[in-house]
Image: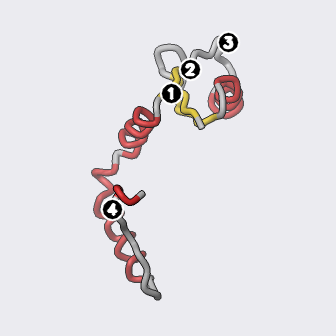
C-alpha cells in the first residue's frame, strides 16, 4: 500500500489516502473528498511521513484521559492469560 497526500496548496481539501497507485488515490479523492478539482496533484509519502500525518491528525493530547479509561476497561475485560504488549524488537 502507498500513501498519497493531497495538500491544500493544490486542492480544496486536505486528505491522505492509502491506495495501490496514484490513479486509484485520485479516484478515491474525487469520489469521496472533492470532485471539483480538475487537476489532482497528490504527493507520495513514505510510511514514516504517513505515520507523522496520523499522529498530527489524531491530536491525542486532549483525549488522554478518555483513552486511558478505555484502556483500563479493555484490560479489565481480559479473561484469560495472554501477552498484551511486546517489545518492538520482537516484531
Quadrant of the image occupied by residue 87: bottom left
Q: Earlier in the sequence, mark 4 or mark 3?
A: 3
Q: From the image, state whether disc 2 or disc 4 is nearer to you.
A: 4
Residue receiving disc 3: 38
Disc 3 element: loop
| Count of numbered tags | 4
Give the distance between the C-alpha atoms of the residues marked 2 and 3, in whole angstroms: 13 Å
Residue receiving disc 1: 14
Give the distance between the C-alpha atoms of the residues marked 4 and 3, in whole angstroms: 47 Å
Q: Earlier in the sequence, mark 2 or mark 1?
A: 1
Q: From the image, state whether disc 4 or disc 3 is nearer to you.
A: 4
Position in image of residue 1 (x %, y %): 60, 38
Residue receiving disc 2: 42
Q: From the image, state whether disc 2 or disc 1 is nearer to you.
A: 2
Q: Is residue 1 left or right of residue 58?
A: right
User: Tell me, what colour scheme is on the image?
Assistant: secondary structure
Q: Residue at x 37, y 37 (%)?
A: 52
Q: Quadrant of the C terminus?
A: bottom left
User: Would you call the spot at circle 1 few (<14 residues within 10 Å), some (14-19), or many (20 or more)?
Assistant: some
Give the distance between the C-alpha atoms of the residues marked 2 and 1, in whole angstroms: 10 Å
Give the distance between the C-alpha atoms of the residues marked 4 and 1, in whole angstroms: 35 Å
Give the distance between the C-alpha atoms of the residues marked 2 and 4, in whole angstroms: 35 Å
User: Would you call the spot at circle 2 few (<14 residues within 10 Å), some (14-19), or many (20 or more)?
Assistant: many
Q: From the image, state whether disc 4 or disc 1 is nearer to you.
A: 4
Amino acid at each position: 500500500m502507498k500513501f498519497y497526500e493531497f495538500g491544500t496548496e493544490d486542492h480544496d481539501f486536505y486528505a491522505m489516502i492509502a491506495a495501490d497507485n496514484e490513479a486509484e488515490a485520485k479516484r478515491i479523492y474525487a469520489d469521496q473528498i472533492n470532485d471539483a478539482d480538475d487537476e489532482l496533484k497528490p504527493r507520495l509519502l513514505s510510511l514514516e511521513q504517513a505515520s507523522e500525518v496520523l499522529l498530527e491528525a489524531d491530536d491525542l493530547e486532549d483525549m488522554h484521559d478518555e483513552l486511558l479509561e478505555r484502556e483500563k476497561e479493555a484490560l479489565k475485560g481480559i479473561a484469560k492469560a495472554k501477552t498484551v504488549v511486546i517489545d518492538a524488537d520482537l516484531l
